[in-house]
Image: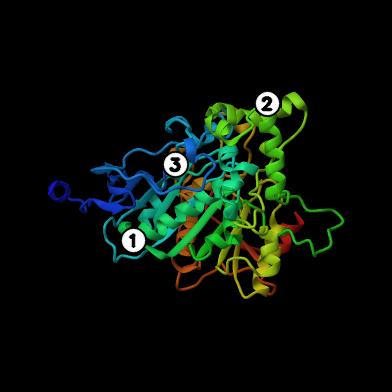
């Protein structure tokens, strides 16, 4: 009866305000209600738990069922980002405008949903599932550049979320594996991502979304996560399209290395589970954390710092200080690498969109071209792009300008989310036009598996007969002037 009265009062208030009703939704764990955003008609549901807090006995365990709550949970605040190092002013910290987020915590398994159609279970809107970057060591799903209102306004349900990072997300030990030898792994952060995808499958219809039309997309380590999920049998069937932004492409060991190797991100060096267990056990034994009970009782700060302390004192590196972090080859979450999955035909058979920025971590065009041709051989398709707009800079933040220049790594995020209003940069009308174009392409891909939309258009898949990248840029007058460019031109640069 109480729940019924709450629902009636919500409907009455919504009608008085001239808005769509803001219904109480039922998801795994209990009832929730969202809040209106500044974008007309768009609701945000912030801080929805999608699993139990991974603390105490749940540290280094697969995500456990969400803890139920009583009453209606008002989802107006983002959940805790995963525990990570402090972020200081300068560089990316200032670029993204960090500072208003919740405190970092091991209790971090929360997600957020943006939608125009809460409660319309027959709406069946496409779903975009965003995976943040940060080297698998830092970051969270509610960063200001990931604002989701504009995606929802395009009739796409956007989901962002947090997952475990660093030594809480990627940590293996023989005693942990012995707890569940059938599913032995250290890839807790990747399991979080899969758990969030399963939550989407089971609950997204409540937000007007279609669980059978899900696009995963990510940038940097988020795009590497997209690649890992595309190679993982545990994620098979949980998504229908994939977007890889600044995560490289295919490193094909069957091809002879060029005389002068192209620049680009290093191939991900995966440790086996046994290698990770041995390396991390050595660190824990050194710290006198000689059994699992002691390791789980250790403070958050101790576990976070141990890898670096061990390296500084002993001079030895370990799996806890590996850069970059890559999920372990555990024969469960990740039986084979992304490159191996491509070559053996075991990659998720979905359409892909893949690209990089002009001043990224090296020229990724050769790897991306190889991936496109690999997918073509197997009957798939890939849309390739480069983001080539140097970001405008008025000199007001030299602590950023000295590190982040041109179309730098991550600069395209402002445009894909059309979140430019959250940034200090002196945007021109051309930037807003370019952002609208990119958001339209990305949201069309979510809807139709074609960035052009159902009528087709200029951006065609990269193939042997049509080896072209879409290049996003402005002209000398700061007017949007994107065009398709031969891939050979980008590969040679």
Residue 421, position as x, y percentages in the image: 43, 41
Report whether 45 appears left or right of 232: left
Q: Which residue is mark 2?
A: 309
- Horizontal side of residue 11 vs 395, given as left or right: left
Element carrying mark 1: helix
Q: Residue drawn 59% across and 38% down?
A: 166
**How many residues crowd mark 2 within 10 Å: few (<14), some (14–19), many (20+)?**
some
Extreme-right residue of the structure? 259
Mark 2 or 3: in front is 2
Q: Measuring from the top left, give residue 255's x and y in whole percent.
A: 80, 64
Q: Which mark is residue 72?
A: none
Residue 205, disc: 1
Quadrant of the snapshot with the C terminus: bottom right
Q: Name the residue located 31 percent from the left edge and 42 percent from the top edge.
A: 75
Q: How many marks?
A: 3
What residue does disc 3 label?
Answer: 142
Tell me the CA gap for discs 2 and 3: 30 Å
């Amino acid at each position: 009866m109480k729940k019924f009265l709450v629902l009636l009062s919500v409907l009455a208030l919504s009608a008085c305000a001239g808005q769509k009703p803001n219904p109480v939704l039922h998801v795994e764990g209990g009832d929730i209600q969202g809040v209106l955003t500044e974008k007309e008609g768009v609701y945000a549901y912030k801080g929805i738990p999608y699993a139990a807090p991974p603390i105490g006995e749940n540290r280094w365990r697969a995500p456990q069922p969400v803890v139920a709550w009583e009453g209606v949970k008002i989802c107006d605040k983002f959940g805790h980002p995963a525990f990570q190092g402090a972020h200081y002013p300068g560089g990316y910290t200032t670029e993204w405008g960090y500072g208003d987020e919740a405190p970092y915590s091991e209790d971090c398994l929360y997600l957020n949903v943006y939608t125009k159609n809460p409660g319309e279970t027959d709406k069946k809107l496409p779903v975009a599932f965003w995976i943040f970057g940060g080297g698998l060591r830092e970051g969270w799903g509610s960063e200001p550049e990931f604002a989701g209102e504009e995606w929802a306004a395009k009739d796409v349900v956007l989901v962002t979320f947090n997952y475990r990072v660093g030594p809480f997300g990627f940590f293996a030990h023989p005693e942990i594996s012995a707890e569940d030898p059938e599913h032995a792994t250290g890839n807790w952060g990747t399991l979080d991502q899969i758990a969030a995808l399963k939550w989407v499958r089971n609950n997204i219809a409540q937000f007007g979304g279609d669980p059978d039309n899900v696009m995963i997309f990510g940038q940097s380590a988020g795009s590497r996560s997209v690649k890992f999920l595309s190679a993982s049998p545990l994620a098979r069937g949980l998504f229908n399209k994939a977007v890889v932004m600044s995560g490289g492409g295919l490193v094909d060991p069957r091809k002879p290395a060029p005389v002068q190797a192209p620049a680009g991100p290093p191939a991900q060096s995966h440790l086996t589970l046994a290698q990770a267990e041995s390396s991390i056990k050595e660190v824990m034994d050194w710290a006198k954390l000689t059994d699992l009970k002691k390791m789980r009782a250790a403070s958050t700060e101790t576990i976070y710092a141990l890898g670096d302390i061990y390296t500084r004192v002993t001079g030895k590196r370990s799996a806890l200080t590996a850069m970059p972090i890559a999920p372990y080859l555990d024969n469960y979450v990740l039986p084979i690498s992304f490159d191996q999955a491509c070559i053996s035909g075991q990659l998720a058979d979905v359409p892909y969109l893949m690209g990089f920025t002009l001043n990224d971590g090296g020229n990724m065009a050769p790897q991306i071209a190889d991936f496109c041709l690999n997918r073509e051989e197997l009957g798939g398709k890939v849309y390739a792009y480069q983001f080539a707009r140097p970001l405008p800079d008025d000199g007001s933040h030299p602590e950023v300008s000295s590190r982040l220049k041109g179309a730098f790594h991550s600069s395209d995020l402002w445009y894909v989310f059309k979140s430019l209003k959250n940034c200090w940069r002196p945007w021109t009308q051309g930037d807003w036009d370019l952002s609208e174009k990119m958001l339209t392409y990305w949201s069309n891909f979510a809807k139709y598996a074609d960035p052009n939309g159902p009528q087709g258009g200029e951006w065609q898949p990269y193939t042997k007969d049509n080896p072209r990248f879409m290049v996003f840029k402005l002209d000398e007058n700061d007017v949007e002037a994107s065009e398709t460019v031969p891939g050979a031109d980008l590969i040679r640069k």
